[in-house]
Image (cartoon, rainbow, N blue to C red):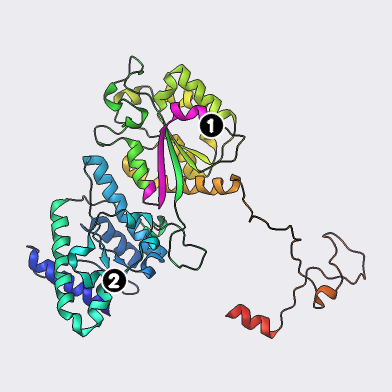
Amino acid sequence: MWVERLFRDLCSHVMALTDLPAGSEAGFMDREIRSGEGWSERLGRALATCRVFVPLFSPRYFASEMCGKEWFAFAQRAIRHSAHNNTPAEVIVPALWVPVPPAQLPGPAERLQFNHNSFGDRYVTDGLYGLIKLRGYAEEYEHTVYELAKRIVRVAQSVRLDPSRPVDYRGVPSAFGTPRANGVQGAPVGPRTLHVSVAAATGHDLPEDRSPEYYGESALDWNPYHPTAQRPVAYVAEELIRTLDYQVTLGSFDDDAGHFDAKQPPARPEILIVDRWAVADEQRRRRLAAFDQDPRPWVHVVVPWNRYDPQSRTRERELVHRLEETMPVTMGQGRAACRAAANGVASIETLGQILPQVVEAAAQQFLRHAQVYPPAGGTHTERPRLLGPMGMGGPTPPPPGPHPPGRDSHRGTHHTDAGDADDHQS
C-alpha cells in the first residue's frame, strides 16, 4: 500500500514537471500487473522502453532474485548506450525505501554515483518508509518525493536511452550475485573475481591487408564493432560482467601467456576474447596453440565478429578454419552457449545476451577445479551413514550389490518418528 502511494505521488510530480499528454502513463510499477495479463511480457516491454529505472533500496529488495533480474535487464540497455556513444549512461536513480548498510550492497548498487544526502538527513536515516509512515514527517516526505521526481525528470531529459527488443527477464541472471550463507539475507558473498584476457593485434603488428581503424596501442583497444560501437569490446565486456556482481581484471593475452600454468589450480574463472585476425600473426598463433594444449575448463572463449567489416567478411572462412585448427580444445568445450560464443558474436546486443551464460559456465567450472581449503585444525571424520531404527546399535549396512536370499539386512533405511517430521516441517 505504501509503495503504491509513493508510486502515485512520483507519477503525479513527473506529469506536472513534463509535457506528457494528459492521461498518459508517467511510470510503471510491476506490482500493478494483474493475474492473467501476461505479466512477464508486459514487464519485459516496460524494461525495454522505460527511460529511467528507480529501484527501492531495502534489504528485502537485494534478497530478491527477481529484482536482480530486472536490474540486469535494464542495465544492459545502459551498457549498450555507452558502447554506441562512448558516453556514460547514468539512468538508474535509486530511492531509499529502508536504509541499507554499505556492507550489504551488491557491487552494482555500491558503484552507483548517487548522493542521497541532498534529499535531507531524515530521508537518509529513516528512508521513505519512515517518512511516509510517521505523521510528523509528512512535510519531509513531500519534499523528498518532489526532489526525487525532479531528479528522475532531469536524468530522462539528459540521456536519451534507446528502446530495445523486449527480453524475457526471467531468463537473464541477477545483478545481485549469490546471497551470503552466513545468515545475512540478501548480502553479497563478497568480491567474486573474474579475469578477461584479450587476444588481438595492435595497430603496430597488423597484417598488410588489415585496416588499423579497429585497433589501438594495446590489445585492449580492439573495437571489432566499429563504427557502430565507439568503445573497445574489452571494456563493454567488463561492464557487463561487473553488472553480474563480479570484480573484473583485464589483460592482454600476449602479456598473460607467460603466466598460464594449467598444472596449478585456477585462481578465478576467465574469459578469453579472441580476434580471429590474431592467428594471422605466427608468433601469437603459436602462443594460442600452446595454451590450447593443456585443458583449462574454467577458461571460455568469446569471439566477437563483425560481418559488416568488409575485410573480415572476405576472409571469414579462412580465419575461422585457422582459429579452430589452432585452438580445437578450448573452442569446443562447454555448453551450447559457450560454443555459440566461440563461433562468433555478431553484435553488442548479442554479446549482452550470451556473455552472462558464458560467465556462469566458467564460474561453475572454476568451482569444480579450484583448490579446496578445509578449516584449519580440523580432524578427519567418517562420513555419517544412515542406519536402521536401532541407531548405532543396529547392524552395519552391507555394501551395495546382491544379497543372499533370506539375509536379514538394512539397506540404508531411515526411520523418522513424529518429532522428526515436525522438525523437518519447521
Query: Pointer 1: what residue?
Result: 260
- Residue 335, given in percent of the width and then of the height, sits at 52, 45
Residue ID at (18%, 63%): 118
Residue ID at (40%, 66%): 64
Looking at the rendered structure, the kind of residue marked 1 is Phe
**Is residue 24 at all visible to an observer of this figure?**
no
Quadrant of the frame with the N terminus: bottom left
Over which residues does the magenta segment extend? 241-260
- Under circle 1, the secondary element is loop
Residue 396, numbered circle: none
Quadrant of the frame with the C terminus: bottom right
Instruction: Say left or right for 117 vs 233.
Output: left
Instruction: Say left or right for 228 vs 151.
Output: right
- Residue 327, given in percent of the width and then of the height, sits at 52, 28
Query: Pointer 2: what residue?
Result: 97
Residue ID at (39%, 63%): 104
Q: Which is more N-terminal, label 1 or label 2?
A: 2
Whether 328 is drawn above or below 74: the answer is above
Instruction: Say left or right for 359 vs 36.
Output: right
- Under circle 2, the secondary element is loop
